[in-house]
Image: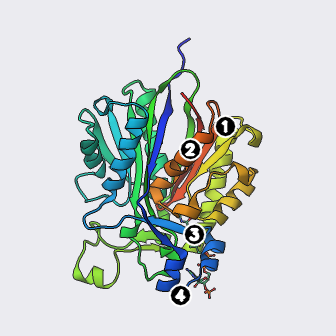
């Protein structure tokens, strides 16, 4: 019988800019305290990409270059590069095109995928389909966001949450039982009400009026998003565990989107998983949107062994959410 081809994660790499924005910095800018931010979110500092004309691609290029080097991959062998981002360098061309060109992926086609905090998971599952069908052999998925370009640094509830960063994985075919085994991806456009940007798109193009009204900043109703994020992430984990007959003992790590430490504790509790099994780096990087999951994986990868069972999960603007079951290695 022919063995099923899965998309294995053949390598992971991350990049964060050097500049740190700490809670102490926020204490000087806003009516807030380190104590409030840490107890409500778990975040102590985030990284910010500084400088003129520095877009998300700057970080994506670094992450992908490091990935290719580490996995000994000739950029000419890449078939496809998918870039998950809500902060593209420009409306067009795609940031994926800019990254592919810069790393020398001259034989790849590339595009951007926009699913906010779920962008990386959506893109990873999308990329895996091209591998499973046998169409392509090497797919790069990069999650990158320069959230500092969307954040209103006068809105204390939202601005303390976000940071900038990038993470990338290489997907390659595997027939030995490693890789992305299953996924559940969901969405609900009714979420627009609670998490959106009012202007800058085709509905309300940029104008003096939109700028004066501060409509180019991210708006979030934190409490509404918090509640639904907990229930949908926990539900997705449970669905994927049941479908694949996985118990909490079988799982080595959950690799969750990093939005709030309290969300992660509540999700772990509802899904019946101990916190030691939850990857976490929110303390150092905050919420980097499409980059949180690959950045976490990059940091924890040295601890992982082939055959370790991982559950990825996420929730974000859209709403978008889901989970994936991945066997590490291959
Ligand atoms: O990644 C995409 C998905 N996003 C998420 O999953 C984020 C979900 N939401 C959250 O993580 C949380 O709702 C927040 C961290 C955004 C806010 O935490 P919260 O516990 O929901 O606080 P809150 O908005 O209910 O605010 C509580 C109080 C308010 O004061 P009053 O009205 O009780 O007097 C806020 O004005 O805390 C105040 N507050 C602050 N105080 C000091 C809000 N932000 C701050 C601040 N410093 N930075």
Badge number at residue 184: 2
- Residue appearing at x 57%, y 36% in the figure: 182
Label 4: how many residues lie within 10 Å, few (<14), some (14-19) or many (20+)?
Answer: few
The reply to whether residue 259 is visible in this rendering is no
Question: Spatial distance from mark 3 to mark 1, Cα to Cα?
Answer: 37 Å
Q: Earlier in the sequence, mark 3 or mark 1?
A: 3
Of the two numbered discs 4 and 2 in the rendering, the one whose residue sits closer to the viewer: 4
Question: Spatial distance from mark 1 to mark 4, Cα to Cα?
Answer: 47 Å
Q: Earlier in the sequence, mark 1 or mark 4?
A: 4
Residues tagged 1 and 2 counted as in contact (Cβ below 8 A): yes
Badge number at residue 300: none
Q: Earlier in the sequence, mark 3 or mark 2?
A: 3
Residue that label 4 marks = 31
Q: Earlier in the sequence, mark 4 or mark 2?
A: 4
Of the two numbered discs 3 and 2 in the rendering, the one whose residue sits closer to the viewer: 3
Ligand 1 shown in quarter: bottom right
Residue 149 is left or right of residue 102, and the answer is: right
- Residue appearing at x 28%, y 35% in the figure: 108
The image shows residue 34, relative to residue 113, as above or below, that is below
The image shows residue 289, relative to residue 129, as above or below, that is below
Q: Position of residue 277 (x, y in %)?
A: 70, 48
The image shows residue 250, relative to residue 144, as above or below, that is above
Badge number at residue 243: 1
Residue that label 3 marks = 44
Label 1: how many residues lie within 10 Å, few (<14), some (14-19) or many (20+)?
Answer: few
> Which SS class for mark 3?
loop
Question: Spatial distance from mark 3 to mark 2, Cα to Cα?
Answer: 32 Å
Residues tagged 3 and 2 counted as in contact (Cβ below 8 A): no
Q: Earlier in the sequence, mark 4 or mark 3?
A: 4
Residue at the farthest bottom position: 31
Whether the residue under disc 4 has CB within 8 Å of ligand 1: yes
């Amino acid at each position: 019988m022919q063995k099923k081809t899965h998309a294995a994660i053949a390598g992971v790499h991350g990049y964060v800019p050097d500049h740190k924005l700490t809670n102490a910095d926020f204490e000087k800018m806003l009516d807030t305290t380190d104590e409030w931010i840490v107890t409500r979110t778990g975040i102590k500092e985030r990284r910010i990409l500084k400088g003129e004309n520095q877009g998300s691609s700057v970080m994506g290029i670094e992450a992908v270059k490091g990935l290719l080097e580490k996995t000994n991959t000739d950029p000419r062998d890449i078939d496809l590069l998918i870039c998950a981002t809500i902060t593209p360098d420009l409306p067009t061309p795609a940031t994926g095109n800019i990254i592919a060109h810069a790393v020398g992926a001259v034989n790849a086609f590339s595009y951007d995928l926009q699913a906010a905090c779920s962008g990386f998971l959506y893109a990873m599952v999308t990329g895996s389909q091209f591998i499973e069908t046998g169409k392509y052999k090497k797919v790069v998925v990069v999650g990158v966001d320069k959230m500092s370009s969307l954040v209103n640094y006068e809105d204390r509830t939202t601005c303390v949450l976000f940071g900038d960063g990038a993470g990338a994985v290489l997907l390659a075919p595997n027939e030995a039982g490693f890789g992305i085994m299953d996924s559940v991806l969901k969405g609900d456009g009714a979420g627009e009400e609670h998490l959106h940007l009012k202007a800058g798109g085709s509905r309300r193009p940029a104008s003096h009026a939109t700028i004066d009204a501060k409509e180019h900043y991210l708006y979030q109703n934190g409490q509404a998003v918090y509640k639904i994020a907990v229930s949908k992430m926990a539900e997705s984990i449970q669905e994927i565990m049941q479908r694949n007959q996985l118990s909490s003992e079988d799982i080595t790590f959950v690799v969750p989107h990093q939005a709030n430490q309290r969300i992660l504790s509540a999700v772990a509790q509802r899904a019946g998983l101990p916190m030691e099994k939850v990857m976490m780096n929110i303390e150092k990087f905050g919420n980097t949107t499409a980059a949180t999951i690959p950045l976490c994986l990059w940091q924890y990868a040295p601890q992982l062994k082939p055959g370790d069972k991982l559950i990825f999960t996420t929730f974000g603007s859209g709403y978008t959410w889901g989970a994936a079951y991945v066997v590490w290695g291959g």
